[in-house]
Amino acid sequence: MAHGGDRYRNRIRLDFSVNLNPLGSPEPFRKAMEQGLRDAAFYPDPMQEKGRRAAAAFYGMRLGCEISPDTIIPGNGASELIMALFHGLCPRRVLLSAPCFTGYFRAAEGKCAVDVCPAAEKDGFQAKEPLASMIRHDTDLVILISPGNPGGRLVDHSFLKKLLAFTEERRIPVLIDECFHGFTGRDEESGIRLLADHPHLMVLRAFTKIFALPGLRLGLLFTGNGELRKKITASLPEWNLSSFADAVLRTAGDRKEELGVFLDDTVRMVKELRDKMTAALRKEEIRVYPSDTAFLLTHGMGNLSEPLLRRGILTRSCEDMLPGGYVRLAVRPEAEQIRLLEEIKIIRREQRLLTDV
């Protein structure tokens, strides 16, 4: 299946296909990887005690709530945790709002029935009330993505709380994928803050997207349910975190105040860049859907992706998630946005000349 970031089979100068922090990675984490290199002479701690304590301290400060280290399962990226969740919980019937990250369909393939609730375009392709009406008597896992991917919108918080009340009453596990939540600046709406009141809730975070270190591979799954944690953890390999990822996680706890400032700067910068990028694309008569995070879903660029790629600019076709000519673009620094728009104008002029001939 297609994913962003394939610079291994393409000659790329500008990458708009992966949704990373446009500020890059913070200095404390670069230094942490030097410590990870020294620690690489030893096996990592399979219990990940220091890393889990650090993650609890970091997110507790960021979200303004108390988090126990025991509620956290670190993983070698969010993708590993998704696979472990399906292997560990063995759901028979899953309800999933789509369009969404294709990794969920891959994790479910051959293991369980998947009921798909199609999110409407008018709702920014984000889950709404119809999702709740699709919960069956045998549904044993519900998955929400907030912000949605590729839509970019957060789940409405009042709807989320109503849904969780309904599923909790029926003891149905719910996973909220918050891999892009850190870019939104709406920490008060994170599902992590609801864990104490919803024992069947799980929340997934991709630590390295917000810190622009996707190659490091570090994801976190939060749940207060000991039974769910035990099943998921049992499906993970031993030493699933490298010494580098463990060192970065520990540094997040040690430098949480400094990193909090970095995230505040990130949220402000992403909004500013997103607004500029939206206005520039719309000026080119490209439809841009409202977004709460670090990427934009567009329509009207389907015939531009290949010509852009030939010019070294990588975009993310959404054909595997949302067929019909939709393209997802990462929010990038202004200089890169200007270059993208210049190339779009050149390609369109060339296309018009070919049509006239």
Image (spheres, rainbow, N blue to C red):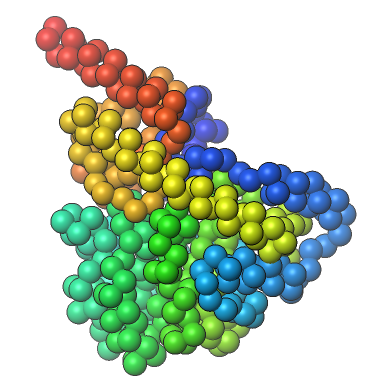
Q: Position of residue 274 (x, y in %)?
A: 35, 41
Q: In this view, which residue lies farthest toward the top?
A: 357
Left or right: 328 as drawn, with respect to 350: right
Q: In this view, which residue lies farthest toward the bottom?
A: 169
Residue in front for this viewpoint, 253 or 176 = 253
Q: Is residue 34 above or below residue 315?
A: below
Q: Position of residue 51 (x, y in %)?
A: 71, 67
Please give the name of the residue rendered at 37% of the width and 63% of the height, measured from the top-left corner.
146
Q: Would residue 274 be seen by someone viewing this image from the given angle?
A: yes
Q: Position of residue 124 (x, y in %)?
A: 23, 55
Q: Is residue 42 above or below residue 20?
A: below
Q: Position of residue 228 (x, y in %)?
A: 53, 83
Q: Would residue 134 be seen by someone viewing this image from the given angle?
A: no
Location of residue 315 by image quarter: top left
Please give the name of the residue rendered at 33% of the width and 35% of the height, measured from the top-left corner.
276
Residue in front for this viewpoint, 238 or 28 = 28
Q: In this view, which residue lies farthest toward the left?
A: 356
Which quarter of the rendered picture does the C terminus lie within?
top left
The mark total stands at: 0
Please give the name of the residue rendered at 33% of the width and 44% of the height, measured from the top-left corner.
296
Please give the name of the residue rendered at 52% of the width and 33% of the height, measured from the top-left corner.
7
Q: Is residue 138 above or below residue 174?
A: below
Location of residue 104 by image quarter: bottom left
Q: Is residue 9 above or below residue 30?
A: above
